[in-house]
Image (cartoon, rainbow, N blue to C red):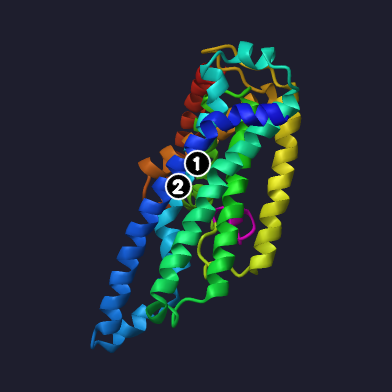
Amino acid sequence: MKNLLKKEWVYVRWLILINIFLLIISSSQIFASYLSQINFFISSNNKNMKKFALDPHFHIQNYFGEKMTLIIIAVVFFSVFIIMAADYLNGGRERLISMSYTRKQIIESKWIMAAISVVIPLIIDYCFIFGIYFINYSILNSINRYRFMLEWMVLNVLTCIFIITFIMFIQSLHGNNIAGVITSVILLFLWKNGEELLREFLNLYGIKFSYSHEVYMVAYYNNMNNMTLKPIVRILVLITFSMLVFFIMVKIFENIPLENKYNLSMYKPFTYVLRIIFVIVITMMAMTIIFQYPNQSKILLYIVTSIAIAGLSIYGSVRIIK
């Protein structure tokens, strides 16, 4: 295992340097924008502007949550893609089979290196943010609390670890195939936006749909004010789900046939799940695009159109996902 980690470290160290550079450059630009807005509102003679500057949504963790989420997730996907695809691009199945390591050791070493390549740059970036925070302590102390920021940073790190585990779990279902990156992007998008899509689709039929999604949305959590779950509960949820997905990922990778180059193999039960998801999503998206405004007099038309789109989607899924 130690030798395997050394082998992976050859390119992971470069990933760490690239990620540190990307995150610090992004953070410095966002922090400069944040400070300029705070200074403008506080120095203004307008009472409403001063009140707005002290609003909770101007907290660093919320401001950065909005601006940095996409950048951080892009860094996570890039890192996992490089680590999981390295062996595939350098010989794929033959290279992995020829290694004198067990499947479990291979996937565990890749997970460790993926986590290191993201977590270390994140921690360094957050140390950088803390440094700038204390330099501007006189301005920011009134609207930002040290403990609040620390909780946000811990949750962000755990969130990234969960997303890394989830992406690698999907990769394992594909036999370590690059196509797993595309699949995980789609599934993570649905995880975040699926409720809204389902609500709009059901609204066409006059069905009202809403429920509390705090627990399953923890993996996307960046705003300390958007959810009522206590930070310790969110931390426990993230750790629990990460461990569960990690365990399943290792078990699947031990049994899934590894792909030959250019051959998109997949864990067989997952192909059926993916087809069902594909059909449902395409049907809902097409319906909400075609019929943007619900009309109770057109229910029959909605049903017929849904069945037709679902039929075409089933045919397409069979042709695409084999």
- Binning the other alpha carbons within 10 Å of mark 2 as few (below 14), some (14 to 19) or many (20 upward) gives many
- Which image quadrant: the C terminus? top right
Asked whether 5 or 322 is in front, the reply is: 5
Residue at the location (74% across, 28% down)? 104
The question of residue 216 being in magenta is answered with yes
Local secondary structure at mark 1: helix
Instruction: Report if residue 5 is visible in the image.
Output: yes
Asked which secondary structure carries label 2, the reply is helix
Q: CA distance from mark 1 to mark 2?
A: 6 Å
Q: Is residue 102 above or below residue 170?
A: above
Rendered position, 262 above or below 23: above
Residue 83: x %, y % from top left: 55, 30
Q: Which mark is residue 20?
A: 2
Residue appearing at x 42%, y 37% in the figure: 286
Say whether residue 7 is left or right of residue 255: left
Residue closest to the eye, 195 or 227: 227
For the record, the magenta segment spans 211-220
Tag 1: amino acid: Ile
Residue at horizontal 68 percent and vertical 21 percent from the top: 268
Q: Which residue is labeled 1 in the image?
A: 16
Q: Quadrant of the N terminus?
A: top right
